[in-house]
Image (cartoon, rainbow, N blue to C red):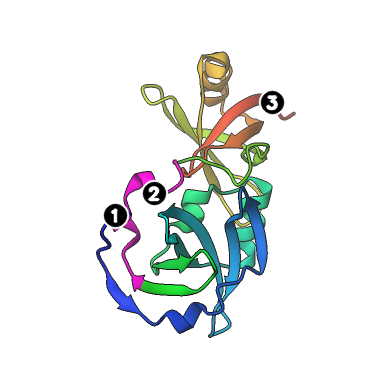
């Protein structure tokens, strides 16, 4: 296992190291939630192991993030990327050997899930349906802003491919309202446009 850059932390915070809800299990719990000694909900990710212990990434979380993981609204990496982060080395019998407070960015990338990895292979990123007007068209980057959306979020950035290029260009030129279906791109604030129709 890699050398940790961080400050030793009180292991009692996470004792007993027992999952509340197992989100992914493969030869034992790999992603699960844990309630710490302060009553805070945490997301736990199995990161590495040797013959003596397993190393877990532990971050504070919320039920909304867990729900989003289940629904495909966020990736595992995005859920783990939090301002507060700990690493815990736990024996194979479940005893916490040591914990450290670390910066998430100091964890080696090969010890974290790949960008865009969903909780389960069967989970697709969240589908989105929105209605608005195509604005700020960037032909080089193949993206645009959908504005005048009803509800609390007034705009959404979309990416598009050649299959929708002409329809999007025309909707932009004509300044008409359109209905857009898209799929969220994991770890990005952009939605990939899948279908467009004009609203009469």
Give the extent of the magenta segment.
Answer: 100-114
Q: Is residue 134 left or right of residue 70?
A: left
- What residue is shown with label 2? 111
Residue 55: image quadrant is: bottom left
Q: In the current view of this chain or complex, which residue is farthest to the front?
A: 51
The circle drawn on residue 198 is 3
* Mark 2, secondary structure of its residue: helix
x, y (%) of residue 107? 33, 55
Q: Residues within 10 Å of mark 1 (few under 14, many from 20)?
A: few
The circle drawn on residue 2 is 1
The mark that comes first in sequence, 3 or 1, is 1
The circle drawn on residue 176 is none
Q: Is residue 164 left or right of residue 115?
A: right
Quadrant (top left, top right, bottom left, bottom right) of the C terminus: top right
Q: Is 75 included in the stretch rendered in magenta? A: no
Q: Residue at x 40, y 22 (%)?
A: 139
Residue 57: image quadrant is: bottom left
Closer to the camera in the image, 188 or 45: 45
Q: Are marks 2 and 1 in contact (CB under 8 Å)?
A: yes
């Amino acid at each position: 296992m890699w050398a940790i850059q961080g400050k030793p932390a009180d292991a009692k915070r996470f004792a007993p190291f027992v999952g509340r809800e197992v989100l992914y299990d493969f030869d034992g719990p790999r992603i699960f939630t844990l309630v710490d000694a302060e009553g805070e909900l945490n997301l736990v990710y199995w990161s590495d192991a040797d013959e003596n212990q397993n190393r877990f990434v532990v971050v504070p979380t919320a039920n909304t993030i867990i729900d989003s993981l289940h629904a495909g609204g966020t990736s595992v990496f995005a859920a783990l990327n939090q301002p507060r982060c700990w690493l815990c080395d736990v024996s194979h019998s479940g005893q916490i050997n040591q914990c450290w407070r670390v910066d998430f960015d100091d964890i080696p990338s090969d010890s974290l899930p790949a960008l865009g990895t969903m909780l389960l292979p069967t989970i697709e990123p969240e589908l989105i349906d929105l209605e608005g007007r195509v604005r700020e068209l960037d032909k080089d980057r193949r993206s645009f802003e959908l504005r005048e959306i009803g509800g609390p979020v007034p705009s959404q950035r979309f990416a598009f491919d050649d299959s929708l290029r002409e329809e999007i260009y025309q909707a932009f030129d004509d300044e008409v309202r359109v209905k857009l279906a898209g799929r969220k791109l994991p770890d990005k604030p952009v939605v990939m446009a899948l279908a467009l129709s004009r609203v009469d």
